[in-house]
């Protein structure tokens, strides 16, 4: 007797999620970060993410062929949230103030995923692909944050500006990961201090004549 192969059918909810890329994006990112928080990023598998989303591996693969791609998707999602605001800049507002506002909006957007991100950062040294993806995506995100603050990030000079802001972000990230204050006051203080420290080289680094102090 020949055993018939079972045909697996995706649930209706899964089919609907797969049909709407934005819904699957959010579901995959939230599932991956939740699993990272619960069991550590090193133990998160794509099959577990797909199961948590209620979609097939094929559906997940079409959007996210790797765990690194999910992290890149998270960064893009956060970038979009920050960039949805109109470009900062009240008349007379300093470049430092504009950049401070933009970066704090970014930390606010990252907030729901903080514990998952902490797990990713902890395990990143053991995962070269994740580390490489994180570095590439961070530089791209920081270039957009500069633009959102009204600071040009194009051209050769943009590389120096982007690297400078990425260094600030990574420095403040350590504080943000452990900041339990309701208003992120510790993160704000750390960001403010970091921006003030680079004030002497602000004109070179950010390509602006506005003082950062």
Image: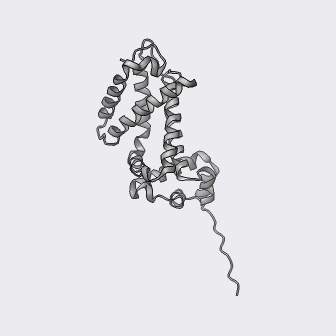
Q: Quadrant of residue 182?
A: top left
Residue situated in front as seen by the camera: 14 or 211: 211
Mark yes or no: residue 154 visible: no
State whether residue 191 is above or below residue 51. Answer: above
In the displayed structure image, the side of residue 89 where residue 199 appears, left or right: left
Q: What residue is rendered at 37% in x and 20% in y?
A: 199
Q: Quadrant of residue 173?
A: top left
Q: What residue is rendered at 39% in x and 57% in y?
A: 38
Q: Considering the image in quadrants, where does the C terminus appear?
A: top left
Q: Considering the image in quadrants, where does the N terminus appear?
A: bottom right
Q: Percent x, y for residue 95?
A: 43, 19
Q: Percent x, y for residue 167?
A: 41, 33
State whether residue 26 is above or below residue 138. Answer: below
In the displayed structure image, the side of residue 65 where residue 163 appears, left or right: left
In the displayed structure image, the side of residue 62 where residue 95 appears, left or right: left
Q: What residue is rendered at 52% in x and 39% in y?
A: 137
Residue situated in front as seen by the camera: 162 or 12: 162
Q: Percent x, y for residue 61?
A: 61, 55
Q: Percent x, y for residue 3?
A: 68, 82
State whether residue 45 is above or below residue 102. Answer: below
């Amino acid at each position: 007797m020949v055993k018939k192969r079972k045909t697996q059918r995706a649930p209706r909810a899964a089919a609907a999620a797969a049909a709407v890329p934005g819904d699957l994006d959010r579901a995959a990112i939230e599932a991956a970060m939740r699993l990272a928080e619960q069991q550590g990023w090193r133990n998160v598998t794509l099959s577990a993410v797909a199961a948590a989303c209620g979609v097939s591996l094929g559906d997940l693969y079409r959007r996210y062929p790797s765990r690194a791609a999910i992290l890149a998707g998270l960064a893009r999602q956060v970038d979009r949230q920050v960039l949805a605001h109109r470009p900062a800049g009240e008349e007379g507002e300093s470049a430092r103030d504009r950049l401070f506002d933009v970066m704090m909006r970014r930390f606010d957007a990252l907030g729901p995923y903080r514990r998952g991100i902490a797990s990713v950062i902890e395990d990143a040294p053991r995962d070269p692909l994740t580390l490489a993806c994180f570095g590439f995506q961070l530089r791209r995100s920081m270039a957009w944050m500069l633009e959102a603050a009204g600071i040009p990030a194009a051209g050769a000079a943009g590389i120096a500006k982007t690297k400078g802001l990425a260094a600030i972000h990574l420095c403040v990230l350590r504080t943000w990961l452990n900041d339990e204050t309701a208003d992120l006051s510790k993160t704000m203080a750390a960001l403010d201090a970091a921006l003030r420290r680079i004030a002497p080289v602000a004109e070179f680094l950010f390509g602006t004549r506005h003082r950062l102090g």
